[in-house]
Image (cartoon, rainbow, N blue to C red):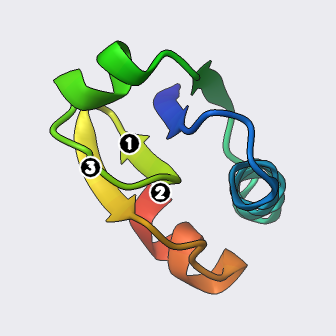
Amino acid sequence: MKKVHILGTGCPKCKKLTEATEAAAKELGLQIELIKVTDINEIMKFGVMMTPGLVVDGEVKAVGKVPTVAEIKKMLG
């Protein structure tokens, strides 16, 4: 199971990234552990200064934007 962190304070883009990530995982038939990180200090520990951020298995994959479902599928794959 992949561990996926959504980094963000709960803004609309963060919610959109969460939905897109869930859709990508579903399309891939992948089980993911989705963790929402809203604490700014915890977000900064990932080296991320702009939200939203997407982290897959400890590796930062996207920062400051909402990738498409297709892009997220590649990141999860």
Between marks 1 and 2, how big is the CA–CA gap? 7 Å
Provide the secondary structure element on which disc 2 rests.
Answer: helix
Residue 73 locus on image (x, y percent): 57, 70
Residue 63 locus on image (x, y percent): 37, 62
Residue drawn at (50%, 37%) of the image: 7
Which of these two is toward me, 42 or 5? 42
Which of these two is toward me, 71 or 30? 71
Provide the secondary structure element on which disc 3 rests.
Answer: strand
- Mark 1, Cα crowd under 10 Å, few <14 / some 14-19 / many 20+, is some
Residue drawn at (52%, 25%) of the image: 1
Name the residue beneath numbered marker 2.
76
Residue 74 locus on image (x, y percent): 46, 74
Asked if residue 24 is positioned above or below residue 57 in the image, the reply reads below
The earlier-in-sequence mark between 3 and 2 is: 3
* Residue 60: numbered disc: 3
Residue 34 locus on image (x, y percent): 65, 27
Q: Give, as a three-letter code, the residue at label 2.
A: Leu
Residue drawn at (49%, 32%) of the image: 5
Residue drawn at (26%, 49%) of the image: 60
Which of these two is toward me, 68 or 73? 68
* Residue 11: numbered disc: none
Find out whether the residues at labels 1 and 2 contact each other: C-beta distance under 8 Å: yes
Name the residue beneath numbered marker 1.
56
Q: Quadrant of the C terminus?
A: bottom left
Provide the secondary structure element on which disc 1 rests.
Answer: strand
Query: Seen in the image, is 29 located left or right of residue 57?
Result: right
Query: Seen in the image, is 25 located left or right of residue 56?
Result: right
Find out whether the residues at labels 3 and 1 contact each other: C-beta distance under 8 Å: no
